[in-house]
């Protein structure tokens, strides 16, 4: 299942090649269980010397993910997308386990050691940088990048629906948006795009709540369809739990649409300004419904907020050339 991480990795590789560099993309297979597999992967990566192979010298290594950022190189730049969150900010929500507690100690020690020896340490958002400081005592420079095909987004007149494209997973919290439909006073509709492990759960929830005429799960959409759905939306909901970065808020703003997010959503809070480029609500269906109704009842205000978001993103000048220059300088 492809997501933001895959786009991030692939677009960085393309940007480096476009800048004239010879690049090899190396990915290690990973699975979340058993804990012993994760431990063996950490040991494997930490013992890999990437300064050269078969007599060929490697000038730079740029790492992005756990546990691959443990490889060794004299000019190692790490741009952390996220850590193994199950032993960090999501640890308290996991089932209690002696193995997981032991893994937490090992992963924390591993991250602190291998990230601490990187020549330069970056994070893909302030939220990720804050986690590195909080759990590992490390300081990383936030380095933002544009979403895929950022130049292709556009805006059109609203057709009166709230759009949320994302994997259907618990941390993405589509459930909040679905439940908010119970409290809407306006005629706003909700379109949720994507596939994932919570599909059947959300289908049943919509049926149980009698929301079939209000909320639609439209499944996987093409990139072209996604851009059109953004363009014709009234606004975009993006209320995950403690997101690392999140392309959705950026894509919505590039489409000239206001974003509704939550106070504990992490990455989106670095872009969404409450009552200016969108609304920042408590993770509560009642408050989310109220925000949707405000957009629906005042479409001119919704357009102004969307335009403000579009201007904000333009002012940030997110581009891959600057990312490459920063990573390699």
Image (cartoon, rainbow, N blue to C red):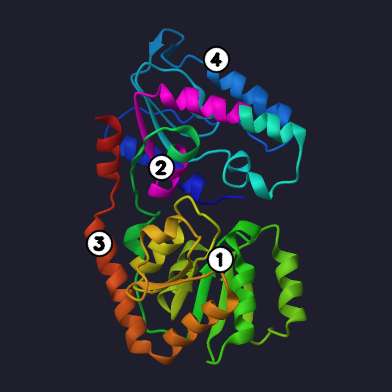
Local SS, label 2: helix
- Majority secondary structure of the magenta segment? helix
* Quadrant of the image containing the C terminus: top left
Q: CA distance from mark 4 to mark 3?
A: 43 Å
Mark 2 is surrounded, within 10 Å at the Cα level, by few (under 14), some (14 to 19) or many (20 or more) other residues, namely many
Label 1 and label 2: CA atoms lie apart by: 32 Å
Quick one: SS at disc 4? Answer: loop
Q: Is residue 219 visible?
A: no
**Would you identify the image quadrant in which residue 133 lies?**
top left
Task: Name the disc covering residue 235, or none.
Answer: none
Disc number placed over residue 129 in the picture, else none: 2
Dots 1, 2 in contact, CB < 8 A: no
Q: Which residue is mark 3?
A: 314
The alpha-carbon separation of the residues under discs 2 and 3 comes to 23 Å
Distance (Cα) linking label 1 and label 4: 41 Å
**Residue receiving disc 4:** 47
Q: What range is drawn magenta here?
A: 106-132
Q: Nearer the viewer, residue 25 or 169?
A: 169
Mark with earlier residue (2, 3)? 2
Query: Dot 1, how many residues are within 10 Å of its Cα: few (below 14), some (14-19), or many (20+)?
Result: some
């Amino acid at each position: 299942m492809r997501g933001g991480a895959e786009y991030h990795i692939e677009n960085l590789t393309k940007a480096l090649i476009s800048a004239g560099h010879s690049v090899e993309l190396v990915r290690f297979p990973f699975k979340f269980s058993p804990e012993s597999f994760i431990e063996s992967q950490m040991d494997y990566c930490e013992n890999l010397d990437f300064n050269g192979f078969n007599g060929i010298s490697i000038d730079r290594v740029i790492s992005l993910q756990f546990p691959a950022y443990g490889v060794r190189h004299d000019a190692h730049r790490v741009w952390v997308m996220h850590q193994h969150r199950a032993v960090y900010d999501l640890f308290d929500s996991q089932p209690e386990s002696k193995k997981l507690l032991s893994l937490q100690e090992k992963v924390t020690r591993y991250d602190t050691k291998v990230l601490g020896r990187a020549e330069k340490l970056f994070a893909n958002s302030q939220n990720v940088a804050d986690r590195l400081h909080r759990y590992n005592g490390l300081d990383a420079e936030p380095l933002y990048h544009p979403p895929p095909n950022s130049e292709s987004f556009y805006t059109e007149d609203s057709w009166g629906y709230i759009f949320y494209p994302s994997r259907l997973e618990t941390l993405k919290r589509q459930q909040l948006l679905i439940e908010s439909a119970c409290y809407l006073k306006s005629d706003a509709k909700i379109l949720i795009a994507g596939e994932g492990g919570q599909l059947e759960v959300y289908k049943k929830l919509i049926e149980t709540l009698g929301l079939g005429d209000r909320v639609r799960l439209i499944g996987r959409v093409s990139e072209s369809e996604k851009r059109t759905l953004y363009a014709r939306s009234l606004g975009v909901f993006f209320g995950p739990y403690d997101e690392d970065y999140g392309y959705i808020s950026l894509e919505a703003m590039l489409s000239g649409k206001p974003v509704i997010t939550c106070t504990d959503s992490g990455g989106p809070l670095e872009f969404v300004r409450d009552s200016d480029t969108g609304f920042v609500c408590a993770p509560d269906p009642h408050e989310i419904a109220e925000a949707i109704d405000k957009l629906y009842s005042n479409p001119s205000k919704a357009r102004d907020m969307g335009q403000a978001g579009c201007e904000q993103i333009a002012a940030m000048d997110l581009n891959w050339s600057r990312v490459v220059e920063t990573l390699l300088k």
